Structures are given as structure tokens and as C-alpha cells.
Amino acid sequence: MKIKLVALDIDGTILNSEGELSTATEEAVAKVKQRGISVVLATGRRLARTLPWAEALNLKGPLIVHNGAVVFDQEKKETVLKKGIDFKSAQEIIEQLNQAKINYLVYTGESAGENLIAPYYTTPEFEELMLRYMGEAGQKVRKMELGEGPIRISVIDQREKINPFYKSLSRFEQKINAMFFGAGRSRWRGVEIVSGGCSKGTGLLYVAERQKVKQKEILAIGDNINDLEMITWAGVGVAMGGGSSLLQKRADFVAPGSSRDGAAWILNELLLKK
């Protein structure tokens, strides 16, 4: 197996449930790099929340953030790819969210997704939910004034509100990519919305083309539904145990969960034992 590029999700993959990066994972990534294999992070996080983990792993290459809507070149210190949501579609979605008083965050296009705004009616309870599930809460505004299509709209609320909202998004067809999160007994559900045809898979394709790496030479590891396009497009796709069952069904390999250093284990098994 000749792998030249490894794409790693962050939450639930290289980080455990406590948000920690283990020594085993750090060492495995370092050894992979010593073999001359490029390592990139591919995450739903925005850039500011991704850079610390790139630094922790001493990764100097491109970063795939916002589920593939943005690619940032660390060497040039500039955004080299930015795909905003169709402007009209974004306005309609935001209007619908406001009418239903559904909790959401907008990552603005003008800032390449680094500026976050939230509706004025967001309550402290929902701000805590945003912090718990997304790691951040936005600045409250009375009116959502967008200069261009936002990079991402993150929605989280009670399932009674989210379920019909998610179904209604089908009317936008190919203009958006809406990813549904949450299952089981939890009362909370989430939806991540990015531009149509945009995913970690398309972000990874962009990076691979820049680095002149073939599809079959790529290994991708993730744990959740937003990793599906990435692991199914890569030459070798790995799902983390304990994550999305759909992802595990579609993956080439299933690694142990992040609490058992699954990412380190699979890197050692597939790339470092030889």
C-alpha cells in the first residue's frame, strides 16, 4: 500500500471524548511524517479552532476546515479555497430559522468563516449548547445582514423543531449540503449547512490536486457523518469505532474508538509496521 497523503478528522478521531490528544497519536503522526507522507487535518471546525492542533502535531501544510468549504495554506498564510452558500438560499434558510425561533450560528463569508453571528433571541441555555457541541457561540445581532453567501450555518435545537426543518431543506436540492447530527434519546439535534457539492471529500480532492497525489494514494480517517464523502473518496477510508454506523459500513477499515487511540493504531497497522 503506497500512501502519500493522510487526512485526519479532529473531534472523535485524533481527539478523545475529553478533547485530548494522546501521546500515542502524536507519536504515530510524527512517524508517518518521517516516512515522507503528508498529513492534513480535515475538520468541521473553523480555522482558529484548528490551528492549535496543527501546531500540536507540527503540521505545516494546508488545512481543510468548515467541512471542506475552506482550505487554508499555512505556508502562505492565506485562504486558497472558499465556497460560500448560495446567497439567496442562505437568506431563505435564515428567514425560516428566525420565524421558527430555531437556534443557529452563521459563519460569515466575508471572514472566510472566522466571524460568528447569532440571532438576538438566542438564550443562555442554547449558548451553552453551542459551546458544548460546537465549541463556540456567536455575537448576537438584531438583524442578519450578509454581504455575501456565508461559509456555514450551524443549527442546533430540540428535535421537535429540527426534524421538520431538516426535511424542509430538500427544496434547495443541489444548492446546499445539509448534514444531520443526533440520534437516540437525546432531545437535541443539529444540522450543518455548507455550499452544495461541498464536503471534506471535495476539500481533500483540492489538496490532493495541489500536491499532485493520486486518489489511490490517500488514506482518510474520520468518525462522523460529515466524514462520509472523504473516506469513501479516498483510496483507503477508515471509520472510528463508536462513531457513525453508516460510516463504519462504508469504510474499508474500522479502527478502535478514539478513547483507545484508534487513529494511532490504524496508522501503525497500515503504514508503520512495514
Image: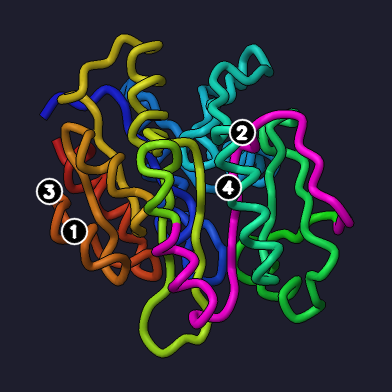
- Is 156 part of what is drawn in magenta? yes
First to last magenta residue range: 140-168
Q: Which residue is mark 3?
A: 252
Q: CA distance from mark 2 to mark 3?
A: 37 Å
User: Of circles 2 and 4, which is in front?
Assistant: 2
The secondary element bearing badge 2 is classed as helix
Q: Position of residue 22 (x, y in %)?
A: 48, 58
Q: Residues within 10 Å of mark 3 (few under 14, many from 20)?
A: some
> Going 50% across and 72% down the picture, which residue do you hit?
162
- Residue 163 is inside the magenta segment: yes
Secondary structure of the residue carrying tag 3 is loop
**Residue found 33% across the figure and 35% down from its top:** 201
Instruction: Give the Cα separation between the discs numbered 1 and 3.
Output: 7 Å
**Circle 4 crowding by C-alpha within 10 Å: few under 14, some 14–19, many from 20:** many
Residue 22 visible? no
State how far apart marks 2 and 4 are (Cα): 22 Å
**In the displayed structure, would residue 41 be above or below residue 213?**
below
- Name the mark on residue 87: 2
Q: Which mark is residue 254?
A: 1
Q: Quadrant of the N terminus?
A: top left
Secondary structure category for the residue under label 1 = strand
Q: Tell whether 149 sits left or right of 251.
A: right
Disc number at residue 45? 4
Q: Amino acid at mark 4?
A: Arg
Q: Nearer the viewer, mark 1 or mark 4?
A: 4
Say whether residue 274 is visible: yes
Helix, strand or loop under label 4:
loop
The answer to which of marks 2 and 1 sits earlier in the sequence is: 2
Q: Residues within 10 Å of mark 1 (few under 14, many from 20)?
A: many
